[in-house]
Amino acid sequence: MSDKIPELEILFELADLFKVFGDSTRLRIMYTLFDDERSVGEIAELLNMEHSTISHQLRVLRTNKLVKIRREGKQIYYSLDDDHVKKVIEMGLDHVLE
Amino acid sequence: MSDKIPELEILFELADLFKVFGDSTRLRIMYTLFDDERSVGEIAELLNMEHSTISHQLRVLRTNKLVKIRREGKQIYYSLDDDHVKKVIEMGLDHVLE
DNA sequence: TGAACATATGAATAACTGCTCATATGTTAA
DNA sequence: TTAACATATGAGCAGTTATTCATATGTTCA
């Protein structure tokens, strides 16, 4: 991995990815999705924040393919897109907690 | 790890950590340090950026304990603080490259 | 169809951040 | 000490972003 400098373009993409993780609201949202899918309303209530704020941030997360959705009637359930997301967060936590 | 919700405070710290990784200049700087220590001037030349810009960003990296320094005469050599830094970047790259 | 609910979107604002320029600090060698 | 070099710092500007408010879209059920 470290034997080749990634293209500049890749590092920009990487920065964009970390930017998405670099906001506490988005991190908290992702954390509520660690074990279960949740609707927008559930997340908003859990975090005690405006539905609108949560919806905006979920869009960012979705655009960056960190969460995916499942529609069920009026509600839309969000869940983490894959295990990578958890791993990145856990790796960061390791660093913060040490 | 996922069996306990981290304190709100921890998630703020974590967001701050990811914020540091969420800038392409800082990522590029860290990448130049993947295998070797380098002086401010070397990094500035490698990235073709102002010394001042590099110095400012190195300060951010240092404040967040991602790089450490070694003084030698007029020059100050920067290197990655520990292997965690590499791991976080590599984990992110995995996600971007897949 | 219309009311009630869940979510999404757009615009506006306030706060933040990276870069540049100018200047300061610190080190070496004459 | 002074000149030359390496790095750091502070202020200001420009660009970005998270939140809020208002409104729109979409779904269910009567």
Image (tube, coloured by chain):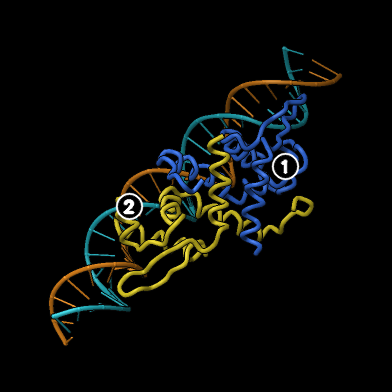
Chain colours: A blue, B yellow, C cyan, D orange
Q: How many marks?
A: 2
- Left or right of A44? Residue D24 is left
Q: Which residue is rendered at x = 57% and y = 49% of the image?
A: A23
Instruction: From this view, report whether residue B98 is shown above or below residue D17.
Output: above
- Picture quadrant where residue A71 is located: top right
Q: Label 1's element?
A: loop
Q: Label 2's element?
A: helix
Circle 1 residues within 10 Å: few <14, some 14–19, many ≥20: many
Q: Which residue is rendered at x = 54% and y = 38% of the image?
A: B96
Marked residue chain, label 2: B
Residue at the front extreme?
A3
- Picture quadrant where residue B13 is located: bottom right
Circle 2 residues within 10 Å: few <14, some 14–19, many ≥20: few
Residue A33 — which label?
A: 1
Marked residue chain, label 1: A
Give the CA separation, mark 1 to mark 2.
Answer: 41 Å
Of the 4 image quadrants, the one containing the C terminus of chain A is bottom right
Q: Nearer the viewer, residue D13 or A88?
A: A88
Q: Are marks 1 and 2 in contact (CB under 8 Å)?
A: no
| Circle 2 residue | B46
Where does the image place residue A52, in percent across and percent down from the top left? 63, 39
From the image, state whether disc 1 or disc 2 is nearer to you. 2
Residue B18 — which label?
A: none
Q: Which residue is rendered at x = 52% and y = 53% of the image?
A: B19
Q: Nearer the viewer, residue C27 or B61?
A: C27
Q: Nearer the viewer, residue B70 or A54?
A: B70
Where does the image place residue D24, in percent across and percent down from the top left? 58, 24
